[in-house]
Image (cartoon, rainbow, N blue to C red):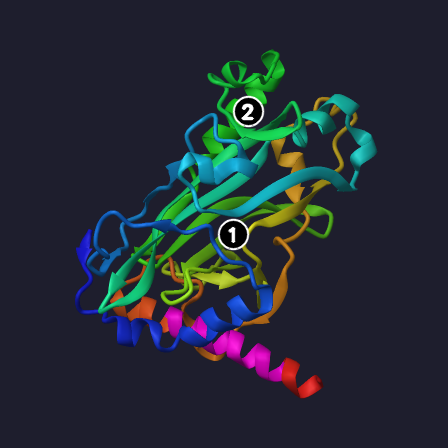
Amino acid sequence: MNDFQGLSEKSMYRTALTALLITSCWYGLGASLVMASQPFPNPYLDTTPRQLELIPPGVVVTQHAEHGWSDLVTIAHPRLGAGAVDSIPEFAGRYASMFKFTVLANVRQAPVNGQPQYWLDKLAIGLAMDVKGQSIVVTKDTAAQFGGELGMIERGVLGGNEDSLKDIKQIARTERLIMFDAQANMAVGDEHEMMVLRHLVWVSPNTGKLGILVWLLEEDKDNAKKYALAEPQMQLLPPGYQEDRVIHVSEGGLLSRIPTPDRFALLSVPPGTAVPFSDEMSRVAGLKAYDREDLQRLVAGVGQSIAQLKARVAQRQ
């Protein structure tokens, strides 16, 4: 990881503090924080694209703290709910809703100059399935071990989803935030188009509460170094977000009773509180690679975007 000393906490977090405080105020959800057995980590910046850590199989999502995770970031509950749902057999709909994309995080605390400070220790992704009324993280090779009975087709579906997890890439990481991209087949009218869902997860240095922003990107035909913003706003999600993930089904041909993966797409970005991009955020939100200065501008843009939203809400009250 690269040396991050040049990006001081003062310059990095002062502009984002408004965003962190607003998130804490609006949602009021705290983490089950883990006390640190080691001192606060040195500041760092990692901008090398890499795969995200995977949640170990066997973690019960509702009991994540018992497995060493302080926070559920999000879990997606997929269901077929738009488009040509009636054009595919019932069993295909059952398989499409069987496995839930899950993100867990661990926040730690240590004293700095006599005051508690918090950092994002780790974040990981996985796939959960319902087993006897509980959502348990599994893989195709471990599902039976934890009570998940999978036939050949279910194992194939889970294996395909596991392969998709490998395409989710971390693009920036510091001791207090992580940004990662997930390839997503998105519904655009009746058509489906591959886009990028960008996620930013950060922890408040003073409260330990998480903030989560998600926004949609598409290829920019005029600039290979960045994506274009596919929508004019981001979505601010509460920690522990339970996503109702509606899947759109496209029309198939006459011989398309057995659906192919490209016929399934997300109907929308995970819905939360819509946060329009500030001018600064719009300039850096779609970059494909970040350096210190870019990340400073992005953190500043987050603070500006949420502060502007709060000001507009206050004016209407």
Residue 83: horizontal and vertical position, in percent?
Answer: 78, 42
Mark 2 is surrounded, within 10 Å at the Cα level, by few (under 14), some (14 to 19) or many (20 or more) other residues, namely many
Magenta segment main secondary structure: helix
Q: Which mark is residue 197?
A: 1
**Residue 309 lies in the magenta stretch:** yes
Residue 179 seen from this side = yes
Q: Which mark is residue 158?
A: 2
Rendered position, 112 above or below 171? below
Of marks 2 and 1, which one's residue comes earlier in the chain?
2
Q: Nearer the viewer, residue 18 or 231?
A: 18
Q: Looking at the picture, which amino acid does disc 2 mark?
A: Leu
Q: Residue at x 40, y 55 (%)?
A: 179
Mark 1 is surrounded, within 10 Å at the Cα level, by few (under 14), some (14 to 19) or many (20 or more) other residues, namely many
Residue 27: horizontal and vertical position, in percent?
Answer: 58, 64
Q: Looking at the picture, which amino acid does disc 1 mark?
A: Leu
SS assignment at label 2 = helix
Q: Which residues are magenta?
A: 298-312
In the displayed image of the protein, which residue is found farthest to the top?
152
Residue 232 seen from this side = no
Q: Nearer the viewer, residue 251 or 169?
A: 169
In which image quadrant can residue 151 be found? top right
Q: Determine whether, in the image, residue 158 is placed left or right of residue 253.
A: left
Residue 161: horizontal and vertical position, in percent?
Answer: 53, 30
SS assignment at label 1 = strand
Q: Residue at x 22, y 49 (%)?
A: 38
Mark 2–mark 1 Cα distance, whole angstroms, equals 21 Å
In which image quadrant can residue 231 be found? bottom right
Q: Which mark is residue 101?
A: none
Residue 44: horizontal and vertical position, in percent?
Answer: 22, 58
Rendered position, 183 above or below 148? below
